[in-house]
Amino acid sequence: MSELHAYTLLVLVGFLPSEIWRVLGLVTARGIADESELFMWVRAVAIAVLAGVIAKIILFPPGTLASVPLVIRLCAIVGGFAAFVIVRRSVLAGVVAGEVVLTVGALAQGI
Amino acid sequence: MPPLPPTDSPKRLAIAVAFAGFRAAWRSVLAYVVIGTYVGIGALTHDFGFGLWWAVASTALVWAGPAQVILVSALGAGAAPVETALAVGVSSARLLPMVISLLPLIRRPKTPFRALILPAHLTAVTMWIEALRLLPQVPREARIPFANGVGLGFMSAAQVGTLVGYYLATSLPPLLTAGLLFLTPISFLISTTRNCRLVSDWLALVLGLVLGPLMAAWQIGLDLLWTGIVAGSLAYGIHRLREAFR
C-alpha cells in the first residue's frame, strides 16, 4: 500500500464514516433545548447504546480477551463493580479491582 | 472546577477555561483507560503494517477506538474499502445520540454554528461521560472551551497511548493486551453508573446491558442502534409513566 493510498483510505474509510454521525448530531441538536423531553429521551438512548457496547465486549470479546473464559470475565466485571460501590463510588478502585480479578483468574487458568 | 483567574480579555479567559478542562481530563481515571486502550490500538496498527504518522492521524481524525480497531484490522487484512467503511460507520453510530445530548448543554442562543464543530468532533465516549458529569458546575458561557479542553485532554492521552503501543508492539504479552482490552467495558460501566441520576438513566443502563447482547445474538443489522432506540425509549417511557402517576 503506497503512502498516499493509505492516507486516502484513512479519510474515506475511517474518518468520513465516523464523522458523518457527529455532523448529523450537530445538525439535529440545533432545535433541542437541554432539560426538554426530547433531550431526556436522546440521553436515555445514548446511555442504552453505551450499555449495549459494554455488554457486547464482555460477552463477545475482541482479540486476546477472548482467550479469557467467560466466567472470569463476568467475575471481573462483578468484582470491579462491587469495589466501586464499596470504596465510596471510586472509579479507580473499581477499574483496578476488575483488572486484578481478570489477571488472577487468567493466570490461574494458565493463560 | 477551580475558580477562574480574573481577566478582562475573553480570549484569555477561554484559554484558561480550556486548560481547566484539559486538566480535568487528565485527573480522570478515564485518561489512563484511554492510554491503555490506545496502547492496544497503536500495537495493532503497527502489526498490520501502517506507519507511525498514519496511526497518529487515525487517532486524531477517527477518534473512536472501536472504529479504529475495525479500520486497521479490516484494511490490513485486505477487506474491500466499501465494506470496511460500512463496518466503521455502524460502530460509530453511537456518536449520534452522544453529540445530540452534549451540544444543548454547551450551546447558548447566539452561539455560531462553527463554534460547535470542534466539540462535536472531539465527542467520544470518554469526553461525553466526563463532560456530562462536570459541565453542570461550569458557567454556561465557559462550557464550549471547557468541553474542548476535556476532549483535547483525552485525545492527547490517546496519542501518548498510540505512540507507546506502536513502539512496544512486538513485546506485549497476551495477558497484558487482554487486560488492556478489558479496560473499556469495566471503566465505561462504572463511569456510566456514576453518571446516572434520573430513573430513565438507570433503566436505560440496565435494559441496554440486557438487550445489547440479545440483539447481537439475533444478528439484527445495526444492533447497537436498535438497542439504543428500544431500551432508551422504554426507559424514557417508564420514567414518564411514573411521573404521571405520582
Image: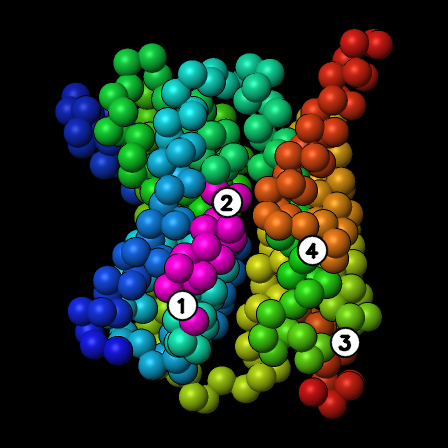
Query: Disc 2 sits on a residue from what chain?
Result: B
Query: Disc 4 sits on a residue from what chain?
Result: B
Q: 10 Å neighbourhood of mark 2: few (<14), some, or many (≥20)?
A: many
Q: 10 Å neighbourhood of mark 3: few (<14), some, or many (≥20)?
A: some
Q: Would you say the magenta stretch is mainly helix, strand or loop?
A: helix
Instruction: Give the label on residue A69, or none.
Output: 3
Which residue is at a point 28% across and 19% down the rendered structure image?
A: B111
Instruction: Give the label on residue B80, or none.
Output: 1
| Residue A93 found in image quarter | bottom right
Q: Position of residue B1 (x, y in %)?
A: 42, 34
Tag 2 and tag 1 share a subunit? yes
Tell me the residue that label 4 is attached to: B219
Instruction: Tell me the kind of residue under disc 1.
Output: Ala
Disc 2, SS: helix
Q: Please name whichever residue, B219 or A4, is drawn nearer the observer in this view of the structure.
A: B219
Tell me the residue that label 2 is attached to: B93
A92 relative position to B2: left or right: right
Query: Disc 1 sits on a residue from what chain?
Result: B
What distance separates the C-alpha of mark 4 from that of mark 1? 22 Å
Residue B90 colored magenta?
A: yes
Q: Quick check: marks 2 and 1 in contact, CB under 8 Å?
A: no
